Image: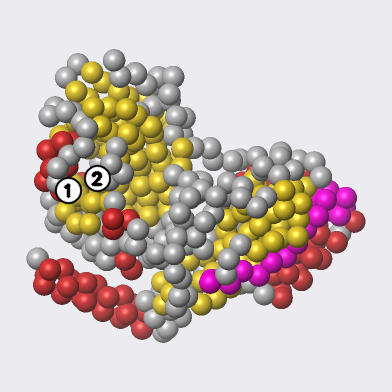
Amino acid sequence: MAEKLGLRAVTTLTRLAVRSLVRGLKPHLLGPEAGRPFEQALSALLADPAVAGSFREARFITLAPDGGWLPAGLEVAPGDEVTVLAAGGFWASKLLNLGFGARIGVWLRAGGAGTILKTPSNTSTVRLDEGGPLHVVAKPPGEWVDDRGTFDPAFPRGGVKGEIGVCLIVWKGGALSGLEALARAGDYEGLVAQALRRTRDPVPAPSGWRYLWRLGDGEIFRDAKAGEGHTICCHTREDVGILQFPVDFPLTETARLRWRWKVETLPCDLPEDIQPTHDYLSIAVEFENGQDLTYMWSSSLAEGTIFRCPLPFWDKVETHWVLRSDPAALGRWLAEDQPLKADYEKAIGAPPQRVVKVWLIAVSIFQRKEGICEYADIELVDGDRVLKCSSRSDAEAAP
């Protein structure tokens, strides 16, 4: 098995390199570029008399890939609305077109040890729950010891190049009126228009669900209606997010996870079992021992394939199970019913006692392609006992 995986990995990497050569060694851009034009254009907009009265302070910061938390030179209070406009990104390999842009790499923290907050995009407005000196850092999602922003020494960053430029704006009143004034003054690479649209039409997490703090908030998942029923839509591109629904459900011999899903577009067309191609859509269950088992839809791996996550940190806690890979089934609603204890024993080993969360996962940061799917009727079942993963008020408590 190890020899086959090694050969497949080499083949996949070769295909990635060939694709880059076909593109003429011109990698897909990570977004607007950071640097002097970015700062000059936004500085001019902020200096407009119609805009200057709308914000309290604004700062520009350049973030390096290997830097720590930097003071922004801004003092914020609980309830302040801060708009983050960011450009640039970091490259791990231009040859393989591997990099991530500012939309997934900018984190904020108020005070010396406030709770960390990732901006959902590179044109986001956030309302702060804590006050104090504002700090900012750029880093890949996931490399944290705790939600206070302590770096995990097990994952030192190296070999990544580039920079992210950030414009931080603390508004006097609400951000909406300030962004409207800023948009009337002009724009730079569409950043202001995007920030205004997101402030006018935010994408809250589906009712009863929340994003995993380790990866930060996002705009990937949203509530939707399908006829008389309720669904959760997933749309990801150059992004990553894990949506979680808390439960407390015994892992008995007869406990099952049931759901329906319709996958329209997969974010990768290569085997997903190595890091450069680990883009996928899945539903997962987290157990009380911290392990999670994720049922994924693969573009290339055979159904029934089981493998440990290839990403650092996640390789200690996450196991993937390829449940679907038939391209003819894309675009169709499919019903699934998985025996959790038997699956855990087969994929991981001796099972724990309880299920503590149900997850929805979307990853598209490596190949930076689009993934689209929809979920419905997610529930944990054991005989006559049913726990629906809908809003907390609708979910049935375990007896």
Asked if 399 appears above or below 14 in the picture, the reply is above
Disc 2 target residue: 293
Could you tell me if residue 303 is visible in this image? no
Q: Amino acid at mark 2?
A: Leu
- Structural crowding at the residue carrying mark 1, measured as other residues with C-alpha within 10 Å and reported as few (<14), some (14–19) or many (≥20): some
**Residue at mark 1 to residue at mark 2: CA–CA distance:** 8 Å
Task: Give how far across and how far down residue 189 sits, in percent.
Answer: 65, 65
- Location of the N terminus by quadrant is bottom left
Task: Give how far across and how far down residue 366 sits, in percent.
Answer: 38, 65
Query: Does the segment drawn in magenta span residue 63?
Result: yes
Query: Does the segment drawn in magenta span residue 27?
Result: no
Task: Give how far across and how far down residue 20 sits, in percent.
Answer: 37, 79
Disc 1 target residue: 348
- Structural crowding at the residue carrying mark 2, measured as other residues with C-alpha within 10 Å and reported as few (<14), some (14–19) or many (≥20): many
177 left or right of 325 in image: right
Query: Do labels 1 and 2 touch, CB within 8 Å?
Result: yes
Residue visible at 81% across and 55% down in the picture: 57
User: What range of the chain is rendered magenta?
Assistant: 50-66
Q: Amino acid at mark 1?
A: Ile
Question: Regarding mark 1 in the picture, which secondary structure is present there?
Answer: loop
